[in-house]
């Protein structure tokens, strides 16, 4: 038996072992955790978008030194709101991407797929061991086995890499989420103060001065929120969109390079 035939037999045995692995049990939890993180951030962005929409529909008046000024919080929050809408769209796509991966993982771990791969591996081994001179039949069976194995392992390996990358970036993501939560709290407080404007002239004056200070705070929070939103946009684009596309490209390259 030549070294080439021994290599083919080793590859077939490896594919046989991989066909018996319970992929969904091993990698399904990682996809579920990634989906929870994505939906949590998505809920935050939708909540922030909601309070900004309320603020954009209001006008707040301030009268420093007897001069009346009318300020619209929407002018301050427009850049952040536009970016948050983009982040929400990306998070929705990311959630769909994870959902598709979970479905593919479930199908790849189905008993029929495993049985098919085991039978194909045994067929390739029999053809290469018992009939080494059988021509292309054993090589075709082995190539088909390798292609199906690569496709079956695509989502598990992607889930492993994506989850680990998300873990590495956890600290930065939590900081960005905290910034957006602070921005949401500031805008929400501004809305509540505006709705509660009632009382005597002294109370109104004090509330208007208070609102002016809060507008400055909201402006500062909004600027920080833009940076945080840009980071979240970049992270989820990388992990949930670019990495899957990269892995699909790599899988196709591997399949195209198989020479038996």
Image (tube, helix red, strand yellow):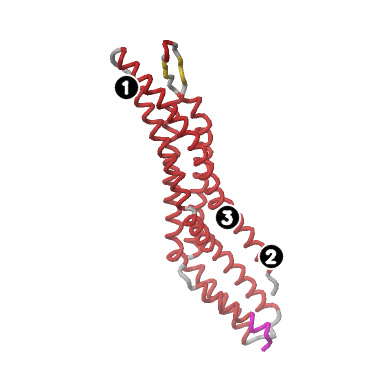
Which of the marked residues, 3 or 2, is nearer the chain's N terminus? 3
Q: Which residue is mark 1?
A: 196
Dot in front, 1 or 3: 1
Q: How many marks?
A: 3
Locate the C terminus by quadrant: bottom right
Which image quarter: residue 141? bottom right
> In the image shown, does 63 or 123 lie closer to the viewer?
63
According to the picture, the residue beneath numbered tag 3 turns out to be 243
- Mark closer to the chain start, 2 or 1: 1
Q: Nearer the viewer, mark 2 or mark 1?
A: 1
- Residue at the image position 49 percent from the left and 37 percent from the top: 224
Q: In the rendered view, does 132 fall on the left or right side of 104?
A: right
- Specify the farthest residue to the left: 199
Q: Using the numbered discs, state the Cα–Cα distance from disc 1 to disc 3 in whole angstroms.
A: 48 Å
The answer to whether marks 3 and 2 mark residues whose Cβ atoms lie closer than 8 Å is no
| Coordinates of residue 121 in the picture (x, y in percent) | 57, 76
Name the element at disc 2. Answer: helix
* Position of residue 236 in the picture relative to residue 41 (left or right): right
Cβ–Cβ under 8 Å for marks 1 and 3: no
User: Callout 1: helix, strand or loop?
Assistant: loop
Residue 30 pos. (x, y %): 45, 59
The x and y percentages for residue 216 are: 44, 27
Which region shows up in magenta?
1-7
10 Å neighbourhood of mark 1: few (<14), some, or many (≥20)? few
* Vertical order, 50 against 194 (above or below): below
Which disc, if any, is residue 140? none
Q: Which mark is residue 256?
A: 2
Main SS class of the magenta portion in the image? helix
């Amino acid at each position: 038996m030549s070294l080439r035939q021994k290599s083919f037999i080793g590859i077939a045995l490896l594919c046989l072992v991989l066909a018996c692995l319970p992929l969904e049990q091993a990698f399904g939890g990682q996809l579920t955790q990634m989906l929870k993180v994505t939906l949590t951030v998505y809920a935050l962005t939708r909540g922030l978008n909601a309070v900004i929409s309320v603020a954009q529909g209001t006008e707040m008046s301030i009268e420093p030194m007897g001069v009346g000024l009318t300020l619209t919080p929407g002018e301050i929050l427009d850049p952040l709101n536009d970016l948050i809408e983009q982040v929400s769209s990306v998070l929705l796509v990311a959630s769909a991407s994870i959902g598709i991966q979970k479905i593919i993982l479930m199908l790849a771990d189905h008993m029929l797929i495993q049985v098919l791969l085991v039978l194909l591996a045994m067929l390739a081994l029999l053809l290469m061991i018992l009939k080494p001179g059988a021509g292309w039949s054993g090589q075709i069976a082995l190539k088909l086995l390798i292609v199906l194995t690569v496709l079956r392992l695509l989502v598990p390996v992607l889930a492993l890499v994506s989850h680990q990358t998300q873990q590495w970036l956890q600290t930065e993501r939590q900081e960005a989420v905290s910034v957006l939560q602070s921005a949401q709290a500031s805008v929400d407080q501004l809305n509540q103060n505006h709705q509660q404007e009632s009382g005597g002239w002294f109370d109104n004056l004090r509330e208007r001065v208070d609102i002016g200070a809060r507008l400055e705070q909201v402006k500062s929070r909004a600027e920080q929120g833009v940076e945080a939103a840009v980071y979240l946009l970049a992270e989820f684009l990388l992990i949930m969109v670019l990495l899957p596309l990269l892995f699909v490209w790599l899988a196709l390259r591997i399949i195209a390079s198989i020479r038996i």
